Image (cartoon, rainbow, N blue to C red):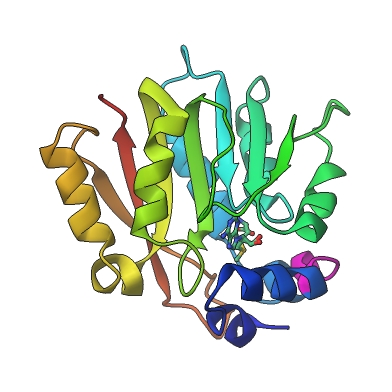
């Protein structure tokens, strides 16, 4: 399994199959082998930009094996973190993660195809890395997820930079801003992989905004 397999995904069924096979080795063969720094970067971005008061809960969209939650829980140790993902095998990996104090990184891990249905939960905030990308989740799902955050809550959403304009994320966020559903996003481009990776140079665009209505 490698990045080519991930970029070959076209449907939720493809994702379910790919990540079932990849879950047990994902952290070793993808995160470590490719110097995949994006989860740490987005957790640090969240910690730097999102208020600490009244932001007690967060949902990690496409949490996978839990790399984002692991980093976020060290930066915000009091935060309640839930994860949504289509792959039960990836969620099993995330379910074993512990915080430095021995408690679990994730409170609830929910298996769901986010293109079909959304869990009936509302959070103070949302975070996502590596899931709004090639053949995974698109702008329609991003819009449907906004009301899983309470009004006044924050969303920190990483989107593959190549797909940001070509797959309609830019237009969708502009439209949600015009309709005053969300505040005007700020955009921050970040490296997905570190300098030692053959994929160094691939960028993600982090959109940071509030739900306003
Ligand atoms: C590249 S992994 C990223 C995992 C993690 N966020 C990280 O950065 O390591 C993409 C994740 O999106 C999940 N995913 C893909 N399609 C999905 C869907 N339709 N609904 C929910 N999760 C989905 C996959 O199962 C996988 O865990």
Q: 124 and 213: which one is in front?
A: 213
Task: Return the x and y of residue 2 as percentages of the image width and height.
Answer: 67, 83
Quarter of the image that includes the N terminus? bottom right
Q: Is residue 59 magenta?
A: no
Compared to residue 105, the image places residue 132 above or below, namely below
Quadrant position of residue 72: top right
Q: 71 and 111: which one is in front?
A: 111
Quadrant position of residue 172: bottom left
Q: 109 and 41: which one is in front?
A: 109
Task: Return the x and y of residue 99 as percentages of the image width and height.
Answer: 80, 33
Q: Residue at x 78, y 55 (%)?
A: 88
Task: Return the x and y of residue 17 as percentages of the image width and height.
Answer: 73, 74
Query: Over which residues does the magenta segment extend?
Result: 22-28
Viewer can see residue 77: yes
Q: Residue at x 43, y 41 (%)?
A: 145
Q: Residue at x 53, y 70 (%)?
A: 193
Viewer can see residue 49: no
Quarter of the image that includes the C terminus? top left
């Amino acid at each position: 399994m490698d990045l080519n397999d991930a970029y070959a995904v076209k449907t939720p069924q493809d994702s379910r199959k790919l990540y079932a096979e990849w879950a047990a080795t994902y952290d070793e063969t993808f995160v470590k082998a490719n110097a995949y720094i994006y989860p740490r970067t987005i957790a640090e971005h969240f910690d730097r930009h999102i208020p600490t008061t009244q932001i007690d809960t967060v949902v990690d969209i496409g949490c996978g094996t839990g790399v984002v939650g692991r980093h976020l829980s060290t930066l915000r140790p009091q935060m309640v973190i839930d994860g949504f993902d289509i792959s039960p095998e990836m969620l099993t990996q995330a379910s074993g993660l512990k915080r430095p104090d021995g408690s679990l990184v994730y409170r609830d891990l929910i298996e769901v195809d986010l293109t079909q249905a959304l869990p009936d939960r509302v959070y103070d905030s949302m975070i996502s890395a590596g899931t709004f990308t090639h053949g995974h989740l698109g702008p329609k799902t991003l819009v449907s997820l906004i009301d899983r955050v309470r009004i006044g809550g924050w969303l920190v959403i990483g989107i593959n930079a190549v797909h940001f304009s070509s797959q309609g994320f830019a237009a969708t966020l502009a439209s949600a801003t015009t309709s005053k559903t969300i505040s005007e996003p700020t955009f921050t481009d970040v490296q997905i992989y570190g300098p030692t990776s053959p994929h160094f140079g691939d960028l993600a665009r982090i959109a940071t905004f509030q739900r306003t209505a």
